Amino acid sequence: MTILGHYRAGSGLKREVTMLDLSESGCRFHDRRTVLRMNAALTIRIGALGPFDATVRWIERDTVGVQFARPIYGPVFEHIRTQLDNSNWRPPA
């Protein structure tokens, strides 16, 4: 599943990202110039939904993996999956 959204860490500026492999418990997202650090707290918006509190669990080059503080509620996740998925998106080369 590939979905457009954004995150904000603390009182920092909003950063637009594309979320990859979204699940009820977390996701990874492409962030070419990330300034995030391990265990950083952030809030995520998925489309117009959220904010969802999350914690950075891993960073690998320009990809960040986060875990949501609380799993996304089943019917909300199903809405995201069926209405917001943009699986044809690919990160820029």
Image (cartoon, rainbow, N blue to C red):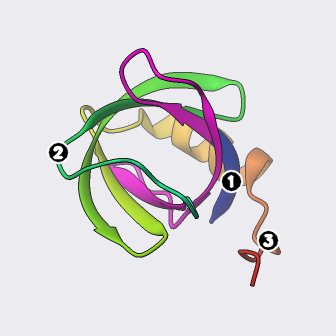
Camera-side residue: 92 or 44?
A: 92
Mark 3, secondary structure of its residue: loop
Quadrant of the image occupied by residue 30: bottom right
Query: Do tag 2 and tag 1 residues touch (Cβ < 8 Å)?
Result: no
| In the depicted structure, whether residue 21 falls above or below residue 70 | below
Which residue matches tag 3?
89
Amino acid type, mark 2: Asn
Question: Amino acid under label 3?
Answer: Trp
SS assignment at label 2: loop
* Residue drawn at point x = 35 percent, y = 47 percent: 36
Q: Determine whether label 3 and label 1 are within 8 Å by CB.
A: no
Residue that extends furthest to the left in the rendered view of this protein: 39
> Three-letter amino acid code at disc 1?
Ile
Number of other residues with Cα within 10 Å of mark 3, as a class: few under 14, some 14 to 19, many 20 or more = few
Q: Earlier in the sequence, mark 3 or mark 2?
A: 2
Residue stretch in magenta: 6-30
Q: Is residue 72 above or below residue 58?
A: above
Of the two numbered discs 3 and 1 on the same chain, state the one appearing first in sequence.
Answer: 1
